Amino acid sequence: MEVPFTPEQEAQLAQIAATTGTDAERLVKDAALGLLHEDARFRAAVREGIAQADRGEFIEEEEMDARLEQMLRS
């Protein structure tokens, strides 16, 4: 698979790659693989949430608000 980048984007990727001590191709490949991993993790979490809801496992709104507040603080 080939993904075209503008010359400016290629320069940015090359600069980031040089800063991190790798090459641009490895940088892009690692980023794409990270995205695939995160997508799989997210989809698994959504499936688990749906399964919990199907089993009637819910939390109260106040607890959800507290969890969100804690997440935003960290």
Image: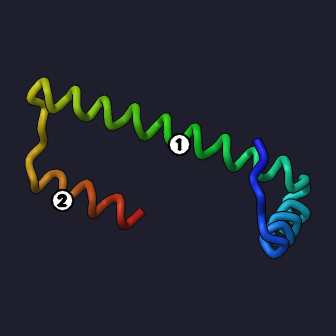
| Residue 13, x across and y down, in percent | 81, 64
Q: Residue at x 76, y 45 (%)?
A: 29
Q: On screen, 70 above or below 60?
A: below
Please report whichever mark, 1 or 2, sits nearer to the chain's N-terminal start: 1
Q: Secondary structure at mark 1?
A: helix
Could you say which quadrant of the image residue 10 lies in?
A: bottom right
Q: Residue furthest bottom?
A: 8
Could you say which quadrant of the image residue 70 lies in?
A: bottom left
* On-image quarter of the N terminus: top right
| Residue 31, x across and y down, in percent | 69, 50
Q: Which residue is mark 2?
A: 65
Would residue 28 appear left or right of 47 to someone viewing this image?
Answer: right
Q: Secondary structure at mark 2?
A: helix
Q: Which residue is mark 1?
A: 38
Instruction: State yes or no: discs 1 and 2 in contact (Cβ < 8 Å).
Output: no
Q: On screen, 33 above or below 7?
A: above
Pick whichever, 27 or 70, lies toward us.
27
| Residue 28, x across and y down, in percent | 76, 51
Would residue 46 appear left or right of 14 to someone viewing this image?
Answer: left
Q: Amino acid at mark 1?
A: Glu
* On-image quarter of the C terminus: bottom left
Q: Amino acid at mark 2?
A: Asp
